[in-house]
């Protein structure tokens, strides 16, 4: 299969949009033909829009963007909508997504990093290899809304590592209760609503508005049957810490059937996702267990599998909830945003949910 689909990116200049651009560099199936951003950037080349007024670069992803991308004009929303596209990545705020994602979805599939539609009854929150069966709901969404395309969101970046690590435990033991405290990277807040460096240096911010509710709701939706959230309870405390990339989470799990350190480790180590093989952005392993008690660490482990592998460590018996506890790390702007969205688009293309124009 060698589809070459014409791709547009809404919010290309933001932290998540830049990760989409980086993940699409030299991509064998997808070609970026148009980029969009706010009215502040519209009319500039992408290269100019990626500089602040002082001339300093706003590029946050690894490496440098390709010269051919930097010369693309930044379009406003109406102009991007008018382009002939086969697929749109949306990496804008919830408020912008609420207005524009449906307008694009009338015409083309939209793969989104935004939360605007995640909780709608006909919108699955997808992680390839974790809840593939939920993608069938996209057919209903299309039919019901009369769209040629659809909206397919990935989860909140804090949900992703938690959901991936819970999946083998839920299959093996049945999850009953989850308690989680996150230590989230600064890049997770994006640039616009971002956290000021002066506020977070030498500090921990103990509240991220809306984050705990998102993680609690999304984890149950992803790990449940379609249309029926998983029956377990999820309770979180989400904090922002002085780390650039990589969300670390301390997770305590109560299980229906007896789980101990050895059995939980075996379940996680044995968790393979054959369905991802052959997808250009798929890691060799979606989940790995590190036996070193000093790991995972954001700086050392966030780029495992080029930022697409979730790392679990410190698996121990959990006496209070009767289950296991562990620490999990995932890359918030790669697996949790740009490259995770590209992986979902690859999976949807291989499964024929996305097809190019005839
Ligand atoms: N950062 C993460 O780790 C992460 C992870 C998962 C999901 N997300 C989600 O991804 C989305 C983007 O987050 P981010 O962190 O990338 O935010 P960000 O860095 O603040 O970027 C926002 C982007 O939206 C653009 N934009 C603003 N108003 C617009 C409009 N009216 N039309 C089109 N584009 C507009 C901005 O363009 P200008 O440059 O012109 O202002 C910029 O490209 C959010 O929904 C966020 O929740 C982020």
Image (spheres, rainbow, N blue to C red):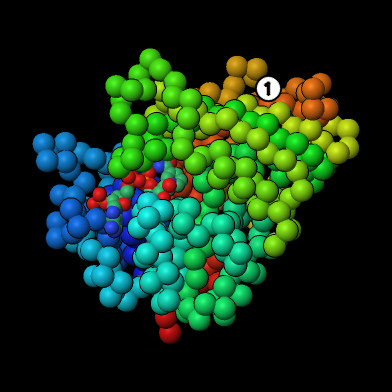
Decide which of 67, 74 is in the foreground and name it: 74
* Disc 1 packing (10 Å; few <14; some 14–19; many ≥20): many
Question: Measured from the top left, where is residue 186 in percent x and y?
Answer: 39, 31
Locate residue 323: give its quadrant: top right
Q: Relative to residue 252, is residue 146 depicted above or below? A: below
| Left/right of residue 181 with respect to residue 80 in the rendered view | right
Label 1 sits on a secondary structure element that is strand
Q: Is residue 32 visible in this depiction of the protein?
A: yes
Query: Where, quadrant-wise, is the C terminus in this rendering?
Result: bottom left
Residue at x 60% of width, y 49% of height? 218
Residue at x 72% of width, y 40% of height? 233
Locate residue 329: give its quadrant: top right
Q: Relative to residue 195, is residue 355 depicted above or below? A: below
Question: Measured from the top left, where is residue 3 in percent x and y?
Answer: 46, 71
Q: Relative to residue 353, is residue 170 depicted above or below? A: above
| Residue occupied by mark 1 | 314
Please state the total of marks drawn on the protein image: 1
């Amino acid at each position: 299969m060698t589809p070459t689909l014409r791709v547009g990116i809404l919010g290309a200049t933001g932290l998540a949009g830049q990760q989409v651009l980086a993940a699409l560099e030299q991509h064998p199936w997808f070609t970026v033909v148009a980029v969009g951003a706010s009215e502040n950037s519209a009319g500039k080349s992408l290269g100019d829009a990626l500089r602040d007024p002082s001339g300093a670069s706003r590029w946050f992803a690894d490496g440098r963007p390709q010269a051919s991308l930097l010369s693309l004009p930044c379009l406003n929303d109406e102009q991007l909508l008018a382009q002939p596209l086969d697929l749109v990545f949306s990496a804008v705020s919830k408020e912008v997504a609420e207005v524009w994602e449906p307008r694009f979805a009338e015409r083309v599939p939209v793969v989104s990093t935004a939360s605007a539609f995640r909780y709608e009854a006909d919108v699955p929150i997808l992680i390839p290899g974790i809840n593939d069966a939920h993608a069938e709901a996209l057919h209903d969404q299309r039919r019901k809304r009369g769209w040629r395309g659809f909206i397919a969101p990935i989860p909140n970046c804090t949900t992703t590592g938690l959901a991936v690590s819970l999946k083998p435990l839920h299959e093996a033991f049945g999850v009953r209760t989850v308690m989680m405290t996150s230590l989230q990277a600064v890049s997770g807040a994006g640039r616009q609503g971002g956290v000021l460096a002066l506020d977070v240096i030498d500090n921990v911010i103990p509240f991220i508005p809306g984050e705990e509710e998102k993680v609690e709701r999304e984890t149950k939706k992803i790990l449940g049957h379609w249309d029926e959230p998983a029956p377990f309870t999820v309770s979180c405390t989400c904090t922002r810490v002085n780390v650039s990339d990589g969300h670390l989470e301390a997770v305590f799990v109560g299980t229906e059937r007896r789980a101990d350190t050895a059995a939980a480790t075996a379940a996680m180590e044995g968790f393979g996702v054959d369905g991802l093989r052959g997808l250009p952005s798929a890691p060799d392993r979606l989940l790995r267990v590190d036996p070193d008690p000093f790991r995972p660490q954001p700086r050392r482990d966030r780029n495992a599998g080029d930022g697409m592998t979730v790392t679990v460590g410190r698996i121990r018996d959990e006496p209070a909830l009767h289950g296991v506890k562990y620490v999990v790390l995932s890359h918030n702007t790669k697996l949790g945003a740009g490259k995770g969205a590209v992986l979902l688009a690859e999976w949807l293309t291989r499964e024929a949910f996305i097809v190019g124009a005839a």
